Amino acid sequence: MTHAMNSEAAGQLGRFALLVRRAARGAALAVLMVGGAAQADTLADALVGAYNHSGLLEQNRALLRAADEDVASTVAGLRPIINWSADITRSMAYGNRPGGGTIRTGDTDINAGITAELLLYDFGQQRLRIDAAKEAVLATRQTLVSIEQQVLLRAVAAYMNVLRNTRFVELRRSNVRVINESLRAARDRFEVGEVTRTDVAQAEARLASARSGLANAEGDLNQAIEEYIASVGKRPGTLARQPRLPEITRSVDSAKQVAMRNHPDMLKAQFDVASADINVLVAEAAVRPRVTLNGSLGVNEEFNSNNFGQSATVGVRIGGPIYQGGLLSSTKRRALAQRDALRGALHVVRNNVSQNVGVAYAILAATRSSAAASSEAVRAARVAFDGVREEAKLGARTTLDVLNAEQELLDAQANQISAQADVFIAAYQVLASTGQLTARQLNLGFQSYDPTLYYNLVDDAPVPSSQQGKQLDKVLRALGKE
């Protein structure tokens, strides 16, 4: 390995180690920065926390590194294969003497040797295996992207649900205060004979119901907080209100075209088909002969004599299968069946991705309409509540009328809060359906995981004794500690 190659490998390893350290402390650093500035947690903070906290992402990054090593393992098949062996053998023989008695003889031999084999030509079979392994790596990378989308979408939902339920609790507390005031007013009016005991009882019943609603809202908030902790990795602080909606493609047809090009499930299916096509060629090449260069070096020594020998051989071997009980033809048929199955899976994935885009846009349109309608309902309910309350002061309305109007306003406000949260979740679901809900495309402003760095370090199968291999071991130890 040349000095230039070692320098380049060392540089890649250094960048990879730096990336590992940055990714490991990214969430903690973000928390410190937010806490030090006494700022509210934003949606971006939650997404960064989820990205750095997710064990599911760590699991699939490790699976990707395993796929990277499959390429290295296959590349090793083009290099010399050197093995050593040694044995010590004790042989004994017994016989009868001509004049009577027994003859016993024994020898102790030591043998040691080294054998080497180098593939010279196999009609491209090993090269095809390498190409198939590379396609599998590309497919595994897309699986990682798909998992990343799921993790970030879960964080969006967790953030919005905490925000939603926080506002529900505030609304319910306000409702309890308003009904308390209504109850006091009813009791005062009852004392002067303006209302009956029934009015007071109605207000008392409504207050008990409001307190029950507050308790339920607080329970829902605690559940939402637990989901936030599970997805983001820390308790939510004070959340910033109303994050900005992401930019999405306006046309459904355009979004479907984007999804066909970018969605990780679509790309994974395409890489799987490409790998399956190559595996068919591998199965066809398996029936052809292999040409190898072979050599051996050995020594032999007998303990009970002066016999000592050395041997060395070198030669070219060519060979191939003649009959293996139908194994090779079965392997080819299996490869063909797997290819056909993955082609069918590609068709299914294409339809599912297109359907998911259409469904996501339909949900977004529905939530937007619901949000607009709920805003109008809040406006109208507030006007009605204010009017009924003023009319009640003049004796034109009963306490029950006021309580009913207040309940209608509460319901309208709750619907508005829920609809607004649903709009944000639906918008990010649209991004996920088109394959655009990734840390890099969201531009979250931190160093995300680069799946190509590890591959570039191991794709030429470095040995542990090499400089690159030693530095790679350091990176792996760092990954284990993190």
Image: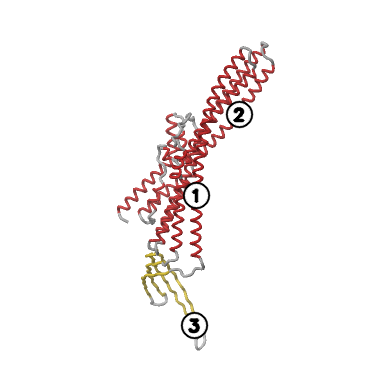
Identify which amino acid the numbered label 2 is placed on.
Ala
Q: Residue at label 2? A: 215
Which tag, 1 or 2, sits closer to the chain's start?
Answer: 2
User: What amino acid is found at the position of numbered circle 3 in the picture?
Assistant: Ile
Front tag of 3 and 2: 2
| Mark carried by residue 347 | 1
Q: How would you rate the neighbour count of disc 3 (Cα within 10 Å): few for under 14, some for 14-19, many for 20 or more?
A: few
Instruction: Tell us which disc is closer to us: 1 or 2.
Output: 1
* Type of colouring: secondary structure
Mark 1 and mark 2 in contact? Answer it, CB < 8 Å: no
Secondary element at tag 2: helix
Q: Is residue 218 above or below residue 200?
A: below
On the rendered structure, is 401 left or right of 142? Answer: right
Residue sitting at x 50%, y 61%: 333
- Label 1 near label 3: C-beta < 8 Å? no
Judged from this view, the residue extending furthest toward the left is: 3
Q: How many marks?
A: 3
Looking at the picture, tell me which residue is in the foreground, 390 or 176.
390
Residue 181 versus residue 214 in the image, above or below: above
Q: Position of residue 273 (x, y in %)?
A: 46, 53
Alpha-carbon span between mark 1 and mark 2: 49 Å
What is the C-alpha distance between the residues marked 3 and 2?
101 Å
Q: Amino acid at mark 1?
A: His
Disc 1 crowd rating (10 Å Cα; few below 14, some 14-19, many 20+) is some
Q: Secondary structure at mark 1?
A: helix
Q: Is residue 337 visible?
A: yes
> Is residue 144 found left or right of 395 in the rendered image?
left
Could you tell which of marks 3 and 2 lies nearer the N-terminus?
Answer: 3
The answer to which of marks 3 and 1 sits earlier in the sequence is 3
- In terms of image quadrants, where is residue 81? bottom left
**Which residue is under mark 3?**
103
